[in-house]
Amino acid sequence: MLSIPISKSNFPTSHGSVNNGSLASYPVNVYEKGAAYKKRWPGCEAFLSLGKHNQKKLIQRIRITPKEFAASDIQLEVENRMGIVTPRIRSKVAERLIEWWDRRVVLGLLGKKQRKVANSELMERIAQLIADFEENRLVDDYGGMPLPNKIQAPSNMVRQIEWVRGGERWINRAKGARWLARSQRDRWLKDGPYAIEKLDQFDRSLEEEWQYRFEDYQEQYSKGRKEAEEVGFELLKWSFYNAPNDVPPIQDDWQSLYLVRGTYQDMANAFRVGWHPEYRRLSQEIEHGTDQTDD
């Protein structure tokens, strides 16, 4: 039998009598300085405000399952149910599976995917994660990941875009892609050292492909055929639109575009690459305090 210990009689007024079903009239100091229900009373207020009909509907939807594990133990519980997975990678597979499941459920609730998660879909994800970690393959954790509401735009990355008159739209694109790329790279490095060599090789490919195009655009500028901002902006656009196809992927099955786009922006912030044909001179002016660009 289900018992919900919430009723109007649980909430006495300051005069000791039964309240009218609302906590709004209670003295504020009742819920301050360590009061017993300081954290619970807003939920109780919400429940009381539903009315008897909706309260009953809510109660009817509650299920009690005895001997269930706590939410804080979910990682360990998933690992315990993965006996077929090699112990060396079990915790990583379980962690990624829980993250995938949470995101998948949200997409279902938003109507972007079927609400019901098919067993075949779950088994396919588990098999893919096991294969990735067994073969030291890099997992795409951030493909399709929504961006946080607030992302810091680093000053040098912004300068590089402003030097070619990219504008606020391009700054927003750049900081989003950079956040995704940095977050994914940090996650790989925490997984283990096997990512280091792949990332180093990937970065060398990025710099090499950029260098070819930078030299071509620099030649167009030096011969007076195009303005500095014009060729620089074309190179910036290449880093977003064409570079993901021109640069060899970090591994054969990699499909997400953010890794190339965002890593280029992180390199631009460190002045390892640039868009303006004279970005090196401009960066030296910053170093010596003679830059006139607003931060």
Image: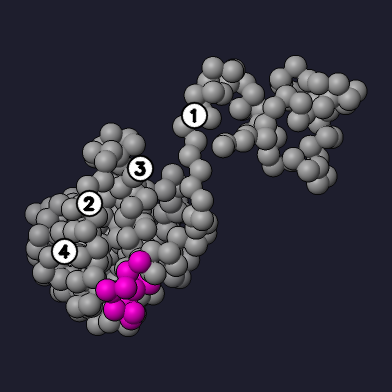
Residue 1, by quadrant, is: top right
Say few, some or many: other residues with alpha carbon within 10 Å of mark 1 (under 14 / 14 to 19 / 20 or more): few
Q: CA distance from mark 2 to mark 4?
A: 25 Å
Q: Earlier in the sequence, mark 1 or mark 4?
A: 1
Q: Say which of 240 and 9 sits in front.
A: 9
Q: Nearer the viewer, mark 2 or mark 4?
A: 2
Circles 1 and 3: CB distance less than 8 Å? no
In this image, 286 relative to 272: left or right? right
Q: As drawn, which residue projects farthest toward the front? A: 1
Mark 1 or mark 3: whose residue is earlier in sequence:
1
Q: CA distance from mark 1 to mark 3?
A: 23 Å
Residue corresponding to mark 1: 60
Range of residues picked out in magenta: 81-92
User: Looking at numbered disc 1 in the image, what kind of residue is underneath it?
Assistant: Gln
Classify 10 Å Cα crowding around label 4: few (below 14), some (14-19), many (20 and above): few
* Residue placed under numbered mark 3 in the picture: 106
> In this view of the protein, which residue sits in the foreground, 122 or 35?
122
Q: CA distance from mark 4 to mark 3?
A: 24 Å
Which residue in the protein does label 2 denote? Answer: 119
Is 259 left or right of 30, judged from the image as shown?
Answer: left
> Which residue is under mark 4?
254
Is tag 1's residue or tag 2's residue first in the polypeptide sequence?
1
